[in-house]
Amino acid sequence: MKEIKHFINGTFVGSASGRTFDDINPANGQVIGRVHEAGRAEVDAAVQAARAALSGPWGAMSVAERADILHRVADGITARFDEFLEAECLDTGKPKSLASHIDIPRGAANFKVFADLLKNVPNEAFEMATPDGSGAINYAVRRPKGVIGVISPWNLPLLLMTWKVGPALACGNTVVVKPSEETPLTTTLLGEVMQAAGVPAGVYNVVHGFGGDSAGAFLTEHADVDAFTFTGETGTGELIMRAAAKGVRQVSLELGGKNAGIVFADCDMDKAIEGTLRSAFANCGQVCLGTERLYVERSIFEEFVARLKDGAESLMIGPPDDPTSNFGPLVSLKHREKVLSYYQQAVADGATVVTGGGVPQMPEALAGGAWIQPTIWTGLADDSAVVTEEIFGPCCHIRPFDSEAEAVALANSLPYGLSATLWSDNVSRAHRVAGQLEAGIVWVNSWFLRDLRTAFGGSKQSGIGREGGVHSLEFYTELKNICVKL
Ligand code: NAD
Ligand code: 6OD
């Protein structure tokens, strides 16, 4: 039985209280390990270590020295690829075929990309005239913000945690990370890699536990954290924003969504089906950018629904190690209860269940897992909770539309605005509609195609701020103007 400890000031430590909770493998329901739950004492020790490390060797390093170390962190992840893959798949149940080409490589890339970016970012400078004629020069310098609290979710644990830790460290900050209670393994393993790469003690700290009245809240309530970066549900984001208001700390919030997909009759149908199968069902529907509501032009509606049904029914449900599997379980039985409640609600609201709608029959060894069927509905009213609320499961509702304006209005009708996907071979239409969609990220004829130099984040209730490229540097540094009178 694994024992999963905190990583504080370069050392793995247990909780003084002795409190632990189970880490469960969602593919079979078995306990993988016992996780130490941090109390205020451990959170405080982690924050103090992070504070002290700012004035140690880390704080004195040049950008280039830090970048070298972060390259070694990325190489360390790659060198231990199989261990990271095993750990991520044990925690999430996701197919190794998926995690080996998304989660783990991106976990490494997040360190290299931001380390390199920071080396090449220019800062502004202005010459100004003064009444005495001698003039002045203003120039900007970037300084790390300080101790950053990083709170991350369970759906892409390593990818989403390093997406914040990579730029935070590249900018010279120190971090205290609180990974999701569902997925503690890869964040902990990264502590070993940090140490081996020469990251000084106290720069990367990890505390385990839950959200409210546990490690998450203790971290956000800690007065000595300078800023918080969070990925998770919109409701949790509101709580974190409230806690961060004390002491006027900044937040970067990447929150929930109920993303629309629009399929025009002039699309390449093969590509639209292939892309929608991924956007609705990849990672068992647990991707914040995924599509849960589809609007399809009426003339191709029947064909699209029939072909998406065939695609969903050909997904291969199976455990992480099965090389033929491309569809794993949900993250937990608790999350499955939530998703199944929407499956029941859809029927109660009069949906036509095109496919799925329940729990698949699994072999005995996997029967305790959080398995669920990929599900497609049609026929729901626009105000059904199934169409308006984030489910975060492998399901989507498909509704026909008759005009471009109607499709845009439907897509924009909810208080969320994370991503949208549109399928059309008409270039003018694609640009026009993309410009009108209220979302932080719009994909045209693709989905989850990521260039890490681009701005990433949500509009409306899907988030505050942008990360990615120079936008991450905006959040993780304080820009200071120095004015020199000549
Ligand atoms: P969650 O909000 O329940 O939990 C996220 C993290 O916050 C966990 O580590 C949790 O322990 C912690 N937490 C919970 N309550 C807290 C509190 N009161 N104070 C401090 N920390 C607290 O989200 P989840 O269920 O882990 O993830 C799924 C959600 O995340 C979905 O809504 C999904 O859309 C969203 N998400 C958004 C993005 C994005 O980039 N916008 C990416 C991935 C996931
Ligand atoms: O690709 C990324 O950088 C990113 N933040 C993805 C988020 C996925 C949400 O589940």
Image (cartoon, grey):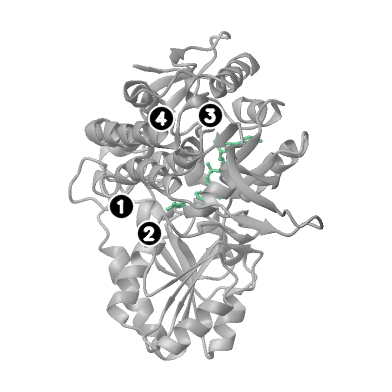
The numbered mark, 2 or 1, whose residue comes first in the sequence reads: 2
Can you tell which mark lies on residue 24?
A: 4
The numbered mark, 2 or 4, whose residue comes first in the sequence reads: 4
| C-alpha span from label 3 to label 4 | 30 Å
Q: Looking at the rendering, in which quadrant would you find the N terminus?
A: top left
**Helix, strand, or loop for circle 3?**
strand
Residue 369 lies, with reference to residue 39, above or below; the image says: below
What amino acid does circle 3 point to? Thr
Q: Quadrant of residue 273?
A: bottom left
Q: Position of residue 138 (x, y in %)?
A: 66, 51
Q: Position of residue 56 (x, y in %)?
A: 52, 19
The residue that label 2 is drawn on is 281
In front here: 46 or 359?
46
In front here: 233 or 449?
449
Residue shown at 52% from the left, 30% from the top: 177
What amino acid does circle 1 point to? Phe
How many other residues sit within 10 Å of disc 1, few (<14), some (14-19) or many (≥20)? many
In front here: 41 or 53?
53
How many other residues sit within 10 Å of disc 4, few (<14), some (14-19) or many (≥20)? many
What amino acid does circle 2 point to? Phe
**Helix, strand, or loop for circle 1?**
loop
Say whether marks 2 and 3 touch (CB < 8 Å).
no
Q: Quadrant of ligand 1?
A: top right
The numbered mark, 4 or 1, whose residue comes first in the sequence reads: 4
The residue that label 3 is drawn on is 174
Say whether marks 2 and 1 touch (CB < 8 Å).
yes
**Helix, strand, or loop for circle 4?**
strand
In this image, 136 relative to 59: left or right?
A: right
Can you tell which mark lies on residue 327?
A: 1
**Helix, strand, or loop for circle 2?**
helix
